[in-house]
Amino acid sequence: MALRHGAGLTTGGRGRLATIAITRTAMPSKPTTPLPPRIIGGDGTVWVQPFLHQHFVQLGAMAWQGLHRSGRGLVVCEVELPQGRPIHWATEPVPHRLGYWPRGEVTAQLRALRLDTVDHGLLQHALVTYDAGTELVALMLASAEPTIVQLRRMRITPAECHRQLQRRRSEFCGVGR
């Protein structure tokens, strides 16, 4: 899989739709139990929640930036999971690439990826009805099965995620000084 120009993806696999709603109660400010230190076998999507916990500020910032550049759409996250070994989420960086597909391009992009099993109607409904101020919809690609995630009632809004990322970038890069 490879992101091209921040908008398109190429992959050889087909997958089914999995929907996860992460709410304030599902992602507390301070976890009451530690994140799993590794990927546990199963349906291939158990990596999604710990990944989101570590990277939701980046996804939120991409959603906000994409919304303002192209209107409503889908955050696309391609993740490179290590094969044959566990991931230690608290200490190990996981390579990933983010992109954004405007709503009008989502169906064509999914068809180009041969993701025919994704319920396009349900996804389009989510893209029309999500609250862009407090939610985002993302396509997570890493395993054979793509996962559609809708983050609801985010404790840090996409706009705030974008502001935080800009602040951090200026702190470390000297941008805006």
Image (tube, grey):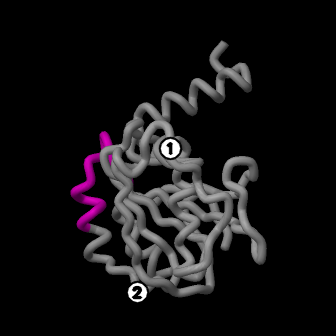
Q: CA distance from mark 1 to mark 2?
A: 34 Å
In the displayed structure image, the side of residue 160 where residue 51 appears, left or right:
right
Q: Who's the residue at 68% across and 48% down the image?
A: 90
Q: Who's the residue at 58% across and 82% down the image?
A: 144
In the displayed structure image, the side of residue 158 where residue 36 appears, left or right:
right
- The spot of residue 22 in percent (x, y) is 38, 55
Where is residue 58, by image quadrant? top right
Q: In this figure, which residue is indicated by the disc labeled 1?
A: 31
> Circle 2: is it few (<14), some (14-19), or many (20+) Cα within 10 Å?
some
Residues rendered magenta in the picture = 125-136
Between 116 and 85, the one lying in front of the other is: 85
Considering the image in quadrants, where does the C terminus appear?
Answer: top right
Considering the image in quadrants, where does the N terminus appear?
Answer: bottom right
Q: Who's the residue at 58% across and 53% down the image?
A: 35
Compared to residue 62, the image places residue 122 above or below, namely below
Between 80 and 51, the one lying in front of the other is: 51
Sequence-first tag of 1 and 2:
1
- The label on residue 93 is none
For discs 1 and 2, the disc positioned in front in the rendered view = 1
Q: Residue at the top extreme?
A: 177
Q: In this figure, which residue is indicated by the disc labeled 2?
A: 117
Q: What kind of element bears circle 2?
A: loop
Between 139 and 104, the one lying in front of the other is: 139
- Amino acid type of the residue tagged 1 in the rendering: Pro
- The spot of residue 150 in percent (x, y) is 36, 59
- The spot of residue 54 in percent (x, y) is 59, 48
Compared to residue 11, the image places residue 26 above or below, namely above
Compared to residue 107, the image places residue 152 above or below, namely above
Q: Please check the rendered image and state whether residue 132 is part of the magenta-colored stretch, yes or no.
A: yes
Where is residue 130, by image quadrant? bottom left
- The spot of residue 12 in percent (x, y) is 62, 85
